[in-house]
Amino acid sequence: MKHVKTINVGTLKASLTKPGCKECANSCQSACKTSATVANLPCEHN
Amino acid sequence: MKIHKYKMFDKNIVIDVNSGAIHVVDDVVYDCLDYYETKSKEEIVEILLDKHSKESILEALEEIEYLVKENMLFTEDFYKEIVLNDKSPSYIKAMCLNVAHDCNLKCKYCFASEGSYEGKRSLMSAEVGKKAIDFVIKNSGYRHNIEIDLFGGEPLMNFDAVKEIIEYAKEQEKIHNKNIRFTITTNATLLNDEIMEYIDKNMGNVILSIDGRREVNDNIRIRYDGSGTFDTILPKIKKMVEKRDKNKQYYVRGTFTHENIDFYNDVVFLADQGFNEISIEPVVLEDENPLAIKKEDLPVIFEQYEKIAKELIERKKAGKGFKFYHFNIDINGGPCVYKRVSGCGAGYEYVAVTPEGDIYPCHQFVGKEEFKLGNVFDGRIDEKLSNEFKNAHIYNKPKCMDCWARFYCSGGCQANNYSFNGNIHEPYDLACEMMKKRIECAIAVKVFEEEN
């Protein structure tokens, strides 16, 4: 494409096929713990 | 909101909210996107003709159309029905163990009232800690990974109990086929060689608190006699980090307040000390507190985040990169949509336990009696209250449904929502604004990395 460079195709929809196992770490959203963005957790589904 | 577009570091960045796709576009596409869903091709050409040629506008529209067909632009939200119809059981698999409701410091912004959580000062007995381990194992269902955060107050004021609790947890994880990961959050004052060695060996993560530059830290992180802690903690934190197994995690973390909204300088200071895993987070305090972040601070705070993003890029290019925790977004993976929707899991996947064994949805709710879920000694939790938290996901938060950042942020901190708006469903505006800026910066850094 001439006008658009796609950086990533998006993985959200594809992740629906995962079982939602919740084996990943928990993500505290408050400021008092260092874990404030859910999007920075690695998936731990094996 | 289906897309979010913004300009940063001379790039036009477009996020497709519901697919997670990210594009860098030229000015023609950037302008066409404003009208794509509401105007005809002819109307768009007419509107933009004074800025772009007809040919380039039509080309841009064709490319947009292609991406729409491929579910990479203006994608619909596929997930709402799936989430609302999800009746699967929840399991508690993360626990904040408040091993000390006491602290040897008197930090001015402490949400826990110098560790006491507005109650009496107390230390958790090993007996309560062991009961808490039993509770989380029993309620973790078939989840294999369990997280325990040793928290306070200052958890190292109760180091003997910490050791006993961990020893017990290690026995129990074998018996029950679980993998328990420990984290400790400490103000670093009590670290010595023995404790450092123990932490390195036993903790999956160690969070070391320091706010940055000496004058910033010593303005806030003080002892009861008013003296600053900087000169004590910096050498200890450095030693802990040097000692740390390089395959294990640590974070040097600080808090910025209204009095150091130039916190870019604190991040740089910490990076210059040789720390490469850094987190500096905004303080959360009631509006009347002089240290509270104010709405008028936001432009300067946004500028700081952009400067940190630039610094990350520059240092990485120079081979001296560091991690700023909030910019660690994995744009090609990360958690599944189920996780993104449910967020922190407070109250149904994650709980906090006090020295007395009382269970709360998280450490921030400790002491708020109306949020008490139960006690580890009777082992039951208030299902109704737990379900309220389970259902407080983004699809039940009207503001989140209009927000492009919902799959990155997951609806904010329930405790902050409650503190500021009296309702866990209504996000705390200032936190939202800062969160969105951090995500924009994080994605801009990723775009830069992918392009280079």
Image (cartoon, rainbow, N blue to C red):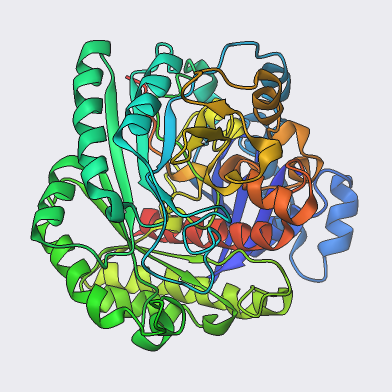
Answer above or below: position of B222 versus B275: below
Q: Nearer the viewer, residue B168 or B142?
A: B168
* B447 left or right, relative to B148: right
Q: Residue at x 60, y 57 (%)?
A: B435
Q: Residue at x 35, y 71 (%)?
A: B210
The answer to whether any part of residue B26 appears in the image is: no
Question: Quick one: quadrant of the C terminus of chain B?
Answer: bottom left
Answer above or below: position of A45 versus A39: above
Q: Nearer the viewer, residue B232 or B159?
A: B159
Q: Nearer the viewer, residue B47 or B359?
A: B359
Count of labels in the image: 0
The answer to whether any part of residue B428 appears in the image is: yes
Q: Residue furthest bottom?
A: B215
Q: Position of residue B23 (x, y in %)?
A: 55, 50
Q: Position of residue B311 (x, y in %)?
A: 37, 74
Q: Position of residue B21 (x, y in %)?
A: 55, 41
Answer above or below: position of B309 versus B415: below
Q: Residue at x 76, y 44 (%)?
A: B1
Q: Quadrant of residue B290?
A: bottom right
Q: Position of residue B214 (x, y in %)?
A: 34, 85
* B41 left or right, relative to B216: right
Q: Quadrant of residue A23?
A: top left
* B335 left or right, relative to B172: right
Q: Nearer the viewer, residue B384 or B40?
A: B384
Q: Residue at x 26, y 54 (%)?
A: B250
